[in-house]
Image (cartoon, grey):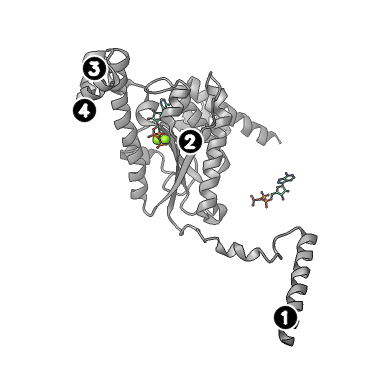
Amino acid sequence: MYFRALNRIFTKFSFTNKCETALYTRSMACSRYEYVKSYEQDDKILPNVWIVIRVDGKKFHKFANAHKFEKPNDENALNVMNAAGIAVMEEFRDIVLGYGQSDEYSFVFRKDTSAFKRRAAKLLSYVTSMFTSSYVLSWSQWMQRPLSYAPCFDGRIVLYPSDENLRDYLSWRQADVHVNNLYNTAFWKLVLESGLTNQQAEERLRGTLSSDKNELLFQEFGINYNTLPAMYRKGTILLRKRVVIGSQDEQKGRQAIVPIHEDLIGNEFWKQHTEILGKYVPGKYVVSSLNRHLERQLAKQLEKEATIAEI
Ligand code: ATP
Ligand code: ATP
Ligand code: MG
Ligand code: MG
């Protein structure tokens, strides 16, 4: 009886005391609510694995229609995606490669990154929200019509233990763009130029092989698929490079994130860009002629670098 009364007084006293401390310090650290933090799960990613984060637009077939994207490829919409990808890589220096196609972007973190203590939820949410906000910020630089609603992206993390797994992952995404783009190119030619309905075009292409679609494009529309823009066929690879423009002195090269549209399935790509799997030192990228898009994607970065260097 005495003990219970004593205990009540003690509990009341210590509670008041803790609350007062909390009020003084304006911190949760000493509050009696702090125990809820122990419900949070440890999501630290295991060491020495490739961390891949892929974001993908939510219902972008609808978003593409609402914003009148050109079919099957709206070049400027792809440039908005690339600008957002570049912004993510500028922010997170441990990303060694980005790969984008359609409404998705994959980011590969260095195996030994210690960014955000390798906490999965932090990494995933920062990358996804940075990508989304940068997509919105970059929109008006490439698109004529205004955004009519807020786009959103989902995100996932996948871990790959070996270099081979990582290469296979990227090859899988690049094979995907090839299959989709060949189909979509043939489909929209049949609809827009031959006047077939969507259903008729679908029936015409059902069960066809890649070689059949290549043949159809060549015979009926005079198109050699392999000469279509590489960005549509191969997607966009973002790499950190020391950019040297024309005959500029090599020492003056500045670091930037460069969009390239190469085949990454074969060995040649990996021989040429050894910095991705090896010890990370950005390779050199000589720009012989700046095309319109490359110029715009690089200009902002190089300006920023110049400002930083001048400070
Ligand atoms: P989900 O929410 O499940 O991802 P989704 O509609 O976004 O659904 P995806 O498989 O991600 O489906 O496909 C994205 C779609 O967005 C494409 O099929 C295409 O219609 C459209 N799209 C994305 N980028 C472009 C572009 N640059 N040009 C034309 N269409 C595009
Ligand atoms: P972390 O990246 O770890 O979250 P942080 O700086 O965002 O670091 P928080 O604990 O999230 O740290 O605290 C957010 C801080 O942002 C506050 O301490 C305060 O300085 C500032 N802040 C946020 N909202 C406001 C606001 N409405 N007015 C003034 N300051 C604000
Ligand atoms: Mg999508
Ligand atoms: Mg997609």
Could you tell whether 308 is left or right of 104 in the image?
right
Helix, strand, or loop for circle 1? helix
Three-letter code for the amino acid on which mark 4 is drawn: Arg
Question: Disc 3 or 4, which lies upstream in sequence?
Answer: 4
Quarter that holds the C terminus: top right
**In the image, residue 270 above or below residue 290:** below
In the picture of the structure, the residue carrying the numbered disc 2 is 284
Q: Residue at x 27, y 19 (%)?
A: 224
Q: Position of residue 219 (x, y in %)?
A: 21, 15
Choose mark 3 or mark 1, whichever is in front.
Answer: 1
**In the image, residue 186 above or below residue 131:** above
* View quadrant of ligand 4: top left
Q: Residues within 10 Å of mark 3 (few under 14, many from 20)?
A: few
Rounded to the nearest whole Å, what is the CA distance between mark 1 and mark 4? 78 Å
Instruction: Answer yes or no: is residue 141 visible.
Output: yes
Q: Nearer the viewer, residue 148 or 13?
A: 13
Q: Residue at x 33, y 27 (%)?
A: 181
Quarter that holds the N terminus: bottom right
Q: Residue at x 53, y 55 (%)?
A: 119
The reply to whether the residue tagged 4 has its Cβ within 8 angstroms of ligand 1 is: no
In the picture of the structure, the residue carrying the numbered disc 4 is 206
Choose mark 2 or mark 3, whichever is in front.
Answer: 3
Could you tell whether 278 is left or right of 256 in the image?
left
In the picture of the structure, the residue carrying the numbered disc 1 is 7
Question: Disc 2 or 3, which lies upstream in sequence?
Answer: 3
Q: Nearer the viewer, residue 55 or 301?
A: 55
Three-letter code for the amino acid on which mark 3 is drawn: Phe
Q: Position of residue 5 (x, y in %)?
A: 74, 82
User: Do tag 2 and tag 4 residues touch (Cβ < 8 Å)?
Assistant: no
In the picture of the structure, the residue carrying the numbered disc 3 is 218
Three-letter code for the amino acid on which mark 1 is drawn: Asn
Q: Residues within 10 Å of mark 1 (few under 14, many from 20)?
A: few
